[in-house]
Image (tube, rainbow, N blue to C red):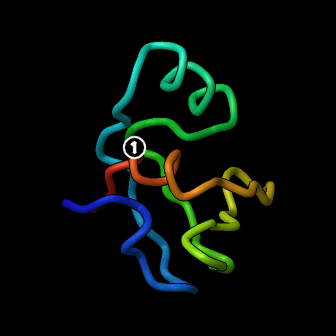
Amino acid sequence: MMPLTFADIGSVVSIKKIGGRDETRRFLNNLGFVEGSRIAIIAKSAGNLIINVKESRIAVGKEMANKIIID
């Protein structure tokens, strides 16, 4: 298991855990980042990511991406 920031571009990964405070987890959950769901890494720039979640592209900052643990 590792933070989302370590995933390679083009890879499809499974979310294992979402860390951080309750409000952070709730925010990510509302965007579609749910434990057990599969997401695809579209692009990276300076640690920031563009991710395909439930057929939507979402930009996530490095700090937020570090709270998403993948397998």
Establish if 9 lies above or below 65. below
- Name the residue furthest right: 56
Q: Amino acid at mark 1?
A: Lys
Q: Position of residue 66 (x, y in %)?
A: 40, 52
Q: Position of residue 39 (x, y in %)?
A: 55, 60
- Between 69 and 63, the residue placed more toward the observer is 63
Q: Quadrant of the C terminus?
A: bottom left
Q: Which residue is mark 1?
A: 67
Q: Residue at x 34, y 33 (%)?
A: 19
Establish if 9 lies above or below 68. below
- Between 67 and 51, the residue placed more toward the observer is 67
Q: Position of residue 27 (x, y in %)?
A: 62, 25
In the image, taking residue 42 as reference, residue 35 lies left or right, namely left
**Few, some or many C-alpha atoms within 10 Å of disc 1 (few <14, some 14-19, many ≥20)?**
many
Q: Residue at x 33, y 57 (%)?
A: 70
Say which element carries label 1: loop
Q: Residue at x 39, y 38 (%)?
A: 35
Q: Position of residue 45 (x, y in %)?
A: 66, 79
Q: Quadrant of the N terminus?
A: bottom left
In the image, taking residue 31 as reference, residue 5 lies left or right, namely left
